[in-house]
Amino acid sequence: METISRLIAAFLLNACWQIALIAAAAYLGGWLLRKITARQRHVLWIVALALCFLIPALSSLWFSREANSGQGSLVNGATANRHSIDQPRTGSSDAPRPPETAMQSPRPTEPKTTPLIRINRILANSLAALYFAFLCWRGGRLFRAWRRTRTIATSSYPIDRSELTQSIIRKCQAAIKGTRAGFLCSRSVPVPVTIGALKPLVILPEQLLREADANLLTSAIGHELAHVARRDYMLNLIFEVIYLPISFHPAAALVRRRINQTRELGCDELVTERLLDAEVYARSLVRLASSAIPVSRDTAAITVGIDDADILEERVMRMLNRRTLNVRGKKSLLLAAALFLAIPCAAAPFAIGVAIKSQNVDAGGYKDAGPRNREKADGTEVEFVMPALSEGRKAGIVIAWLKKPGQSIERGDALVKIETGKGVVAVEANATGVVERLIAPPGQQAPEGAVLAIIRAKEQQEPKEPQEAGARKAERRRVEVELEAQRRTERQAQEETMAARLAGVQGTKRKEERTQEERGVAEKRELRWRVVEGSKGRVFLVEDEQEPELRARRHAEREEMAKEQSELAKQAKIAMNQAIQIATNLYPGTVVESRLVKERSQACYLLSILSENGTETTTTRVLMSAIDGTVINTFKDDR
């Protein structure tokens, strides 16, 4: 479904500008060929209609083939049905962090040979559904026109072949050779029409036979036999089928209209060259047009008749003022018209491609690796995926590739450097073979488990002796057990250190709270009031704080606190907003408290971050060094 939606979207997008360009080129070519025969201009417009359908269709198919076979797409590059295993993390965890510019380097997402427009999957499916509904509606109208045409043929009856009618039919068949058609009469058609591809039928209106005008009847029968000789009914059906998928475009409707007009002008030229004088035929056309109403649009889409083009004035003027050119002039004009039509063909490589945003792709543009240990049928390709990261981190950054596509690599060799949150880590290859393709470019962020590269694995030879294979397996198992034990010990030590730091921070907090309470109590005790008698016998209250000794002591305390804060601010190497940014990156939420404190004889930031997960609210307190931004301790308070 996604492929069909992408093809339809690309077809409609390219058709909007390519059909307009083709119609403009055909119009210029038709203007150059205005002095030559209408039959040659008819061929020009037929070619234009074919190009209106073929160029957008081939452009969309070409882009789809390029998108499916190209290696620039990260989504298509990370295909399934390959073998995936986890890679161990090696290297130093205290390596320097990558520069910020590396994180902003662009990544190739699509083939660079075609301009690309990304659309949402829902929009693409809706567009495909609307286009399919439009095709059903247009196809229904075409089928209804065919049914009405068959109804006209069924309701018709053989004409009364009088001596005059038979002589006119023989005369017309002799003048326009190669025409074998049946003649019927009908009350439901106002003008002569021709139907039938294999067994053509000429249906004449009943009123025309009653008039018994030889010139009028000769003009009508001769024109319809010209349609039969040119196979216009069958060609018109083909043109309608080609026009159906592009009928939404106004320029395509213009091309179709010009085909109908040049078809009628070509039949007029054939009749005036072989059967009737131009003036007599022109008068007959005027009489036929004035004595009948036009055929309905639905029926006219299938039938071909003398009154289809609706350009009576142009037809009469061309018959009466015919111009001729020499052979060299005709060839020059035809060559110029062909060059005009070649312009849209040359612009076809500039088609615009459409890509559908996959719902299985994350913000970084990577498809999840899915279930691990999946092997391809031939077992020759191995996926290299993003390894497991540190706790609380869901994505890593590709710093640099240590191998290039086409280079050989052994299992355990360093393949890529990755930023995992604790530093730059060199990750080892998980297979022996040749690096086939690098999917993630340097500087790109990828989630855990995303496919980073494809390795073309070499066939491993089985060991000659089973004892040697068993010894290697046992040694590998022993190393894995030791590594797992070492990881468990390190994890336990980290947990104990964090618990000790958390207890220290909580003790410091309780000590500060106790000091503040004692200070408040002392202030309340020192605050007393004195009653002073005024000069006129009135009394008023005076705060004890107005006394010089108490005011001096409190001023000294405030200066000491300000001095301590100033010293802490001088020791701080990072600003408060930077500390808040670092803390919120590690623990997303809202900072409700931030202050500068002294902990372990150094300046530290104490931050309180409030985060909500559904109905649960968590307060995370982060004690961070104000010198290098290192998180010293964290503790959470769940509510």
Image: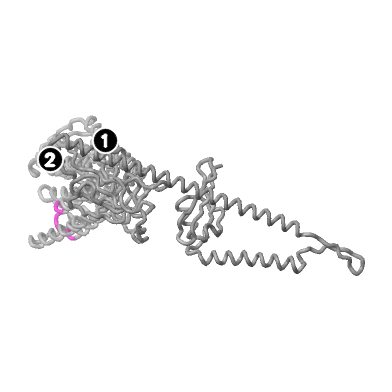
In this view, the mark in front (1 or 2): 1
Query: In the drawing, does residue 557 fall left or right of residue 129?
Result: right
Residue 610, label in figure? none
Figure check: 621 above or below 234: below
Figure check: 231 above or below 332: above
20 or 451, which lies in front? 451
- Is 333 magenta? The answer is no
C-alpha separation, residue under disc 1 versus residue under disc 2: 35 Å
Residue under label 2, please give it.
Answer: 168
Query: Who's the residue at 22% across and 41% down the image?
Result: 241
Residue type indicated by callout 2: Ile
Q: What residue range appears in magenta?
A: 32-40
Crowd band around label 2 with a 10 angstrom C-alpha radius: few (<14), some (14–19), many (20+)? some
Q: Is residue 214 visible?
A: no
Residue 143, label in figure? 1
Q: Quadrant of the N terminus?
A: top left
245 or 175, which lies in front? 245
Local secondary structure at mark 2: helix
Give the percent coordinates (x, y) of residue 123: 36, 45
Residue type indicated by callout 1: Phe
Figure check: 30 above or below 392: below
Crowd band around label 1 with a 10 angstrom C-alpha radius: few (<14), some (14–19), many (20+)? some
Query: In the drawing, does residue 428 fall left or right of residue 326?
Result: right
Q: In the figure, residue 559 lies in which quadrant?
A: bottom right
